[in-house]
Amino acid sequence: MATSAGPSPQAAAQAAAQRTTLARANELVAEHLVRARREQDLALRQRMYSEAYVAQMSLPTQDDLSHVARRFNDIGRGLNAIDITRSLRDGIEWEIVALNEKRYGRNRVRHLLQALLGSDAGSELRRYDFRRLVNANRRDDVTARIAAQPWSDGELEDLCEKGKYDLAGYAATKLTSPIWADRTVNVMAELGMAAEAESRALQYMPPAKELSQNGLAMLTRLAVTESRRGHSDNVLRLVRMVLEAPGVNSLTSVAGSSGWGKCEAKLWNEWPRWRARSIQWLSIPQPPFDGFPSFSGSLAADLAAALAGTGSNTTSLKLIDGLVGLIVREIANNPTGVLPKGADEKTVLAWADRQRRHKEMTQTLQSLMVARVVAGGEVDDAAAKALDMKAVKRFMFEFPHSQISLRILSHSAAERRRLDQASPGRGEFLRYAALIEQGQGREARALASTHPQVREQVYASMLTDIAMSLQNADLEKKAEAMIDAYIDLEYRADTAVVFLLLRQGRTEKAKEILRHFVSSVYGEDVFIGVMLLRELGEPFDASMLTEALRGDTPGKVANWLEAIDALAWSAASDEIDMLLRTPPSELSALSADDAARMRCTAYGLQAIALARGGQLEAGLRLVTDRNLIQRDYWCKGDRDSYFDLSYLVHEWIERGHAQ
């Protein structure tokens, strides 16, 4: 991309002179209220009132805002009656509170919340107070609040999702009531507090029956997390403790879960909310991949997976064989039988339960067959049937220290033949995935050239999930090699790849992908490309941007808007102005209504850019006279509109201009 010289000193000085003061911002809101009183359209008048009241509650002031909140609520109760399709107030309370809590004390914010929510304020006030305690790192107070609500929806685990790992660990050690045992052991295990987790789990080993807590399940979960860290000796010791404990037969009947937990999946917790910077994409801010697929099985299956997850060795293989024998005996001792004709309800239910148990035990046995191969066992006929792509992906993703790829690449001719007999082409599918996981892109490309069908089952998101898992386990060199192989094989490089490259410090390679994003046919890629290139200091000429965009007529116009959206994030109103003056020629090929809608959206984004740059008044001039439909263009998220007074004021304040 060509280099942009940036704004001239004269332009910068002019922009500074046009910045809106706080006093002028208050005047603009007052003028908006005057226009609302004169508006003849009832729906638009109520909408304008709502926008003004939200802006008033957002702007810094020492005035009591209770009367404004009451007026806002009165308007809000009338919105649906006049058939406005989306309510401006949905979720707006927390936007107002978020702005106010940065400036005012607890009592004022609580007072505002109570005024906004009335009788419904109780739970929201508790959420607000809890967030304040977390942000202040008041460990004992946070722990006491969590302890008071043992059935709350994941408050302890959510601390990790917010990056408060030390706070979560502290709270887990202090929550000693039996009702918390299972959750606190999980949190401590996921945080690497293995000794503390083991000590607590041992308190609930059979024959202890305290609140039905299962110490065997706790130790199994700990073995899984230790396996993910590559602590093979600890895994062997924990598995033996479980197998030698009383009540070991319950290993086949107790459900397990070896999926990543919030407190160990740190890389996903740190995922940058790039898409949340986009006006269009605000409704879908999550990563474009499944960070936490859930794999449920039995404790026996999880123990075997933990053993295999640390590598191949004869001790692990012997223990897995012992688990296989346990399951085989249980299947033999619990035949399903045949349901007699005319059986009564009790007999039918008992038969159905036996069928269910038989299915669970059979699934467990299949999982053990896979683990046995990963640990170094032979691929016999039974294992060949179980070793499908889903099972392989699970091991690669959940157990980054496993040697499953090396094991696949070392399959003998007889083992490969059994795999292909179980499912035609399975050997090539597995080998292709293993080559990529090992970073052997050239070899994978050669395999794909002779067996092109391998790409059908080894899809892009599966591979980026596995690379994320490697990076999360601090296996950075291996993650780098895998991503290089992924790129070499010309899979679509999405935002997960960019994130990994930036995380690995490979900025120049990330920029290469972002430059490609800018000329992509995928709208999200255009936004991410333009936005991140600017953030990474990559100079480019916005006037040349429309020539780089690809796609059909509507697609190219949509991507033009994506580029403007990205420039709006960095308040680059001058560059947006260039794009507004040189729209893609395809814009004229649209219908008059569609073209008008696209231009209206583009100028709405320019209004947001101006507000973010401090020029609130200039931005408002672009949207002040919009009707209800125009206020809502391109908006599909939690908030009703972005091209109106309330949002422009919000962004103006967020960027630090309300001084």
Image (cartoon, rainbow, N blue to C red):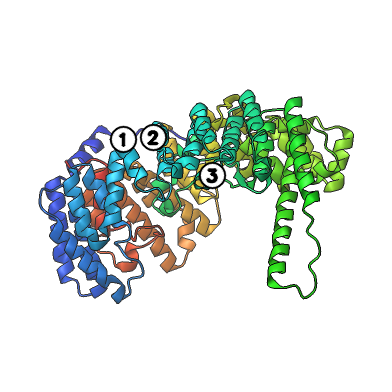
Q: Quadrant of residue 165?
A: top left
The residue shown at (68%, 46%) is 252
| Label 3 vs 1, first from the N-terminus | 1
* Amino acid under disc 1: Asp
Residue 596 placement, left or right of 510: left
Q: Quadrant of residue 452?
A: top right
Which residue does the numbered mark 1 point to in the structure image? 140
Which residue does the numbered mark 2 point to in the structure image? 174
Q: Mark 1, residues whose alpha carbon is within 10 Å: few (<14), some, or many (≥20)?
A: some
Res 250 visible: yes
Circle number at residue 209: 3
Placement of the C terminus among the 4 image quadrants: top left
Q: Quadrant of residue 2?
A: top left
Disc 1, disc 2: CB below 8 Å? yes
* Amino acid under disc 3: Lys
Q: Residue furthest front?
A: 207
Q: Mark 2, residues whose alpha carbon is within 10 Å: few (<14), some, or many (≥20)?
A: some
Question: For the residues marked 3 and 2, what is the alpha-carbon distance in whole angstroms?
Answer: 22 Å
